[in-house]
Amino acid sequence: MDSFHTSSEESGSSGGTPLTPPSPITHDTSRSSYHISDISAFAESLQDAANQAFPNRGRSRYHTVNVCLIRWSEDELQVEHEINHLHHVFDKLYGFNTEIWLIPSAASQIQLTRKTCDFLQKFDAEGNLFIVLYGGHGVINAARQNQWWCRDGPNSPFVDWTSIQTLFSTAASDVLVLLDCCAAASSASGFGSNTMETIAACGFETTAPSPGERSFTYTLIEVLEEWVDKPSFSAAMLHTEILFILKQKPPERGMDGRRWETCSSPIHWVCTGDPKAPGIEIASLRKSNTIGEMAELQPKSTTYVDAMELDDDSSDRNPLTAIRLNGDYNIPHVLISIALEEDQETLDALSCRRWLLNFPALVKYATVEGVYRSYSTLITLSLPVMIWDLLPDHPACSFIGYIISPNKNKQSLSVETESLLLRQAKPTSQQRRVARLSKLRSCDSSYGSEGSDSERALLR
């Protein structure tokens, strides 16, 4: 019988996975009956999400970080090279205690469970962070949970990840899970006393790219090497940068001449019993790194945000909505919709702006793209991916899609016009607060892109 053993850094064909047919969603109206009773509650959740995405303003709260990189001993997918490279990054560049675990093909579940229990008993403590990465085959079982398979085939040895994840959820340490496998999002969720965040290479019923420059692990290594000298960065920021890099890679052309999108979209989710708990963050435990210094000499496009900039109210530049020379956002955004319980019948362009000024988080972290009368009130918002990552689930809040630029069909008012509108919309005693909030982007043409009569009168 194979024994479970830990490999040092020194110790190289992709197959398909059975997929269930996707559910029809084009005409799915099942969530149309849900509403948010109070937009102030949503704005508070938005502020909490921002606090989680930028938790400690450049200071890591972890005293120790322990990492386990998991793959099968029988390496059919040839992930060994990427796993060894990642071991070097975590161990040598970040100073984390890092192990490589090889899952045996016999008694796989028992051996991995035993290894996990020993690992938790040895290193679990307050102020510790666990990082767990798996690279290999993954499938979704009949219970729609993630299983790790040794080989591509029905008779393959496998491990039920759900039971292993449950062990980590009982830890006092926070846990960051990184899954580079197919059907990764079928990983079970749950709530423990700690914070557990997961970044998965792909969704429930999709496949992850094989090892190489389009793989999740390859891109993870690239980001970790470039950000090694950053003061700290959250898991949500890490997810945003990986998504940003993978989405820039062009589709490949197949043998039949058709173009195929070979990069999957990584996803992120949080399991915690405390919605206000700070997000997981990563910071090197070493003081200086040559790779980080070289990266500074060769700057490239990045989604990294210095959290200290978000606290600078004197600056006119909001790093979360900064625009590149080509007109795209520096940071990829998502477009979402929220349905409010009450019908705001009196909202025109000017009253809409006045109403939204009551919610500073909407101004600082989101762009209001549209406000529509519906059978209630429907608002479309765009916000940075790393903040959306940490926004709590609510059935009245729906994902629409990823966006990389502001609304190209929206005629926003000039800054001067906005400032004039906002000065008259608020009492003099609140002038200082209004000046900071005047960065609010206007609602779209659902309320008239040219503005209401009252707006135009202000300019005469």
Image: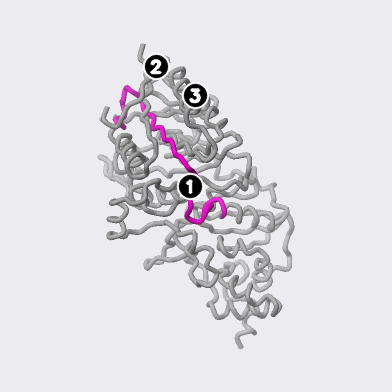
Residue carrying label 2: 155
The circle drawn on residue 343 is: none
Q: Could you say which is closer to the camera, residue 249 or residue 172?
A: 172
Discs 1, 3 touching: Cβ within 8 Å: no
The residues bearing labels 1 and 3 have C-alpha atoms spaced at a distance of 24 Å
The x and y percentages for residue 113 are 48, 21
Mark sitting earlier along the chain (1/2): 2
- Residue at 28% x, 59% y is 298
Label 1: few (<14), some or many (≥20) within 10 Å?
Answer: many
Pick the front one: 150 or 118 = 118
C-alpha span from label 3 to label 2 = 27 Å
What is the secondary structure assignment of the residue under circle 1?
strand
Picture quadrant where residue 447 is located: bottom right
**Residue that numbered label 3 is attached to:** 117
> Is 55 on the left-hand or right-hand side of 378?
left
Please give the range of residues in magenta: 51-80
